Image: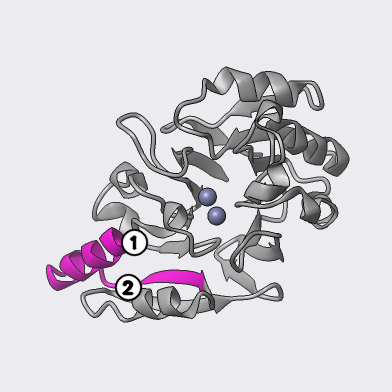
Amino acid sequence: MKLKVLGTQSPYNTKKHNCPGFFIQEGENLLMLDCGSGTHKMLKYPKDLKNLSVIISHLHRDHYNDIYNLQYASFVFHNQKRIDSPINIYLPQSPNSINEDIKAESNSFANYHEISENTKINIGNMQVTFCTTDHPVETYAIKVTNGKTSIVYTSDTSFTSKDRIVQFAKGAYLLICEASLLESYGFPEINSHLTAKQAGIIAKEAKVKELMLTHFWPEENTIQYLKEAKKEFKRVVIAKEGRSKKIN
Ligand SMILES: [Zn+2]
Ligand SMILES: [Zn+2]
């Protein structure tokens, strides 16, 4: 599997950084995990719309804003006969008003599928499974495996779901973990997010090979997150837009 980082920042995108998004390529199949603001411009059109599946981990704007760009692009390229199969969009059922709003877009060439904790998706060689996290809306951590190796993306989560995520990520090659906060901010449970240190603890307990931190606050120097996580787990990198990595 080949991983490409599309976006790393929340709650808004800036000139150099997009809101959350990751792109996984396995053979001819493409899988986008979240499509936050700015991520769609990292795609190559219309090539990347062929065999594309998009999974939205939860319906917070920083994770789904660009779905409307993808929908409209799929509509235009299909009309031009430049793509012949619809994109597949997987999304949570709630909040219902947002789920309905996305599915109601008529200028779109897409199929829609709801996800739940028991959902299993097969996309070519990839199998995708889900684990609920504690966050103010219905939210899923996502595991992608090709039978040889696996990537787990935590999406957004509070530390209260640590044990579930550790179990879900057990033995994965790469854990992409949100690290929105630093210890110095205090009280991460109020914000329903993790500190970099907590991300390090999850990686350590899940015994993953590598940890990639993401979901950074725009005004913070990312080195601070790296330093904090490294106190708990050594093999840690910072997610950066455009960075690609082969996961074997
Ligand atoms: Zn969120
Ligand atoms: Zn978020």
- Which disc number belongs to residue 50? 1
What are the residue bounds of the magenta stretch? 68-91
Residues at marks 2 and 1 touching, judged by CB atoms closer than 8 Å = yes
Question: On the image, which quarter does residue 85 sit in?
Answer: bottom left
The residue pinned by badge 2 equals: 85
Residue at the left extreme?
80
Which quadrant does the N terminus fall into? Answer: top right
The local crowd at label 1, few if under 14, some if 14 to 19, many if 20 or more residues have their Cα within 10 Å, is: some
- The secondary structure type at the circle numbered 1 is loop
Horizontal side, residue 25 vs residue 168: left or right: left
Give, as a three-letter code, the residue at label 1: Lys
Which is more toward the observer, 158 or 4? 158
Question: On the image, which quarter does residue 98 sit in?
Answer: bottom left
Residue 30 visible to an observer of this rendering: no
How has the structure been colored for display?
one colour
Please name the residue shown 68% across and 26% down the image. Answer: 184
Earlier residue among tags 2 and 1: 1
